[in-house]
Amino acid sequence: MSDRQSQPLKKKRSGSETRERDCIIKFRGKADERAAIKASAAAAGLSVGSFIRSLALDAPRTRVVRTRPTPDMERLQRYDARLGRLEGNIYQLVRAMNVGKLVRVDELYTAAKEAEALLAELRQAFGL
């Protein structure tokens, strides 16, 4: 037998088995109490356990629950990405002109039209 086979295998620890909080605390409540606790926790942006911990302890170490972005935030992120791309294009054109390179008029025209279209869309989307 080789050395590897004669040594006992170590148990791998992963997932919830490696966490610091290894004590599970349970308590009984009514269904409406559970719903109210879940709603309060969601309003605070916390999990139920973190919410209860924040109420019960003097110095709780809780983390905010990561939530999916709302449709409005996703729309803002899309506009921000489009604006960033357009900003980069215009910056490159202006930079080229500043160092004395000739910039094609159609590139400037296209960038200006994209900016105009994006601004119109933003004004309509946000009621400006």
Image (cartoon, helix red, strand yellow):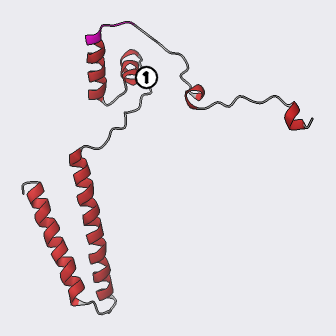
Residue beneath the point at 6% across and 57% down: 128
The stretch drawn in magenta includes residue 128: no
Which residue matches tag 1? 59
Task: Look at the numbered disc 1 and give the secondary structure of its residue.
Answer: loop
In this rendered view, identify the residue nearer to me: 8 or 82. Answer: 8
Amino acid, disc 1: Ala
Residue at x-position 26% and y-position 71%: 86
Q: Is residue 63 left or right of residue 5?
A: left
Judged left or right of residue 112, residue 94 is: right
Q: Is residue 115 above or below residue 50?
A: below
User: Picture coordinates of residue 96 (x, y %)?
Assistant: 32, 86
Q: Which quadrant is the N terminus positioned in?
A: top right
- Left or right of residue 75, residue 53 in this image: right
Look at the image and give the residue range highlighted in magenta: 28-32
Tell which residue pokes out farthest to the left in this image.
128
User: Residue 26 placed where, x, y %?
Assistant: 44, 11
Residue 107 on image: x %, y %: 24, 84
Q: Quadrant of residue 81?
A: bottom left
Say above or below: 109 vs 16. Answer: below
